[in-house]
Amino acid sequence: MSSLDNGAVLGIETSCDETAAAVLAGDGRVLAERLWSQSAEHAPYAGVVPEIAARAHLARLPGMIEAVLADAAVAPAAVAATAGPGLIGGLIVGANLGKGFALARGLPFYAVNHLEAHALAARLPGLAAEPPAFPYLTLLVSGGHCLLVETHGPGAHAVLGRTLDDAPGEAFDKVAKMLGLGWPGGPALERLAAGGDPARFPLPRPMLGREGFDFSFSGLKTAVATIVAGYPSGALPERDAADLAAGFQARVAWTLADRARRGMRAAKTCRVLVVSGGVAANAAVRAALRAAAKEEGFALAVPPPDLCTDNAVMVAWAAIERRRGGDPGADLAVAPRPRWPL
Ligand code: KG4
Ligand code: ZN
């Protein structure tokens, strides 16, 4: 262990539509946290509007940083902010506030990769009796991302597969919109699907029989759109909407489990499947992955929903993992970047 591992870390997250700040002790205990979801600001547009997001981050983040510092009542020894991938306006707000704070106090600054933060969140202390040991297989399923990755440690990720088109959360949101549900659509679609018959409509199984580890959701989404288009506009009966939602959700769960199963067979040194991102909050998805992991002899680790969706705790934690590896946090010159592959 490095001598860097004892100090508290201030974490900042602004890559999409959650504004968040947190202070973690050097051992990963959460000392203070604030999170503001901007969903209500973006809901009228049925999607995240980058300019609105950036302005909302700027309006709220400084006060949130002050609040977590006051709550934590310890001076941070380092600052970490998401620097990508994500919406550039928000990344500039969060990363530059973080850098300014670090500069003013003479602290190291960690430019955190948001995807790495999701991938490492399952190792936060207290979530499981034993945190998943490296290497493990990570399935990251959110509104913006779909990745299957071998996680060997901070800065060491081998991407096995990714989506060729939509992310699963994006597909949930688009199908929810077709079914007349609000935004974000994932949770509403899950509620509607609870009363539906998943076998009623014939829907495709994405990537059925395809080699490799890539994902695709646009064909499934189009199949739902085609069925919806068969009804007179605005006249989809509740029963049919519920059956369609259940069918769509079951197919998403199926394809995630199918791809993860292939990954578990290939990733010979891994024994744990970690699932993270907003779609991991879906019970049907979790159940399908739990069954697949069991069949393959893998343990399943899914952080609680508030650590699966975007948050600042995971950002601070990613920096703590790096500090333990001896990374001194000399990232002041790292510019925020909208694209930043693992
Ligand atoms: O990880 P996240 O908070 O943000 C990023 O995209 O990074 O994920 C948000 C996505 C949205 O597309 C939302 O509809 C989806 O996760 N989601 C769900 C559920 N809860 C959130 N999708 C399906 N079922 C859910 N229960
Ligand atoms: Zn995310």
Image (cartoon, helix red, strand yellow):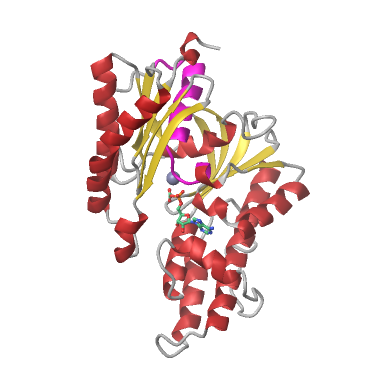
In magenta, the rendered stretch is 307-328
Which secondary structure type mostly characterizes the magenta part of the structure?
Answer: helix
Q: Quadrant of the N terminus?
A: top right
Vertical placement of 200 versus 231: above or below? above
Q: Position of residue 129 (x, y in %)?
A: 69, 31
Q: Is residue 204 visible?
A: no
Q: Position of residue 187 (x, y in %)?
A: 51, 61
Q: Quadrant of the C terminus?
A: top left
On the picture, is 160 further left or further right than 107? Answer: right
Q: Position of residue 90 (x, y in %)?
A: 28, 43
Q: Position of residue 242 (x, y in %)?
A: 57, 76
- Residue at the image point whose x is 36% and y is 56% from the top: 39
Vertical placement of 98 versus 329: above or below? below
- Residue at the image point whose x is 58% and y is 44% from the top: 304
Vertical placement of 100 versus 19: above or below? above
Q: Residue furthest bottom?
A: 232
As rendered, which of 75 and 176 lies closer to the eye?
Answer: 75
As rendered, which of 68 and 316 lies closer to the eye?
Answer: 68
- Residue at the image point whose x is 47% and y is 73% from the top: 222
On the picture, is 37 further left or further right than 231? Answer: left
Total numbered circles: 0
As rendered, which of 64 and 162 lies closer to the eye?
Answer: 64
- Residue at the image point whose x is 50% and y is 75% from the top: 224
Report if residue 309 lies within the magenta region. Answer: yes
Q: Is residue 246 visible?
A: yes
Q: Quadrant of residue 44?
A: bottom left
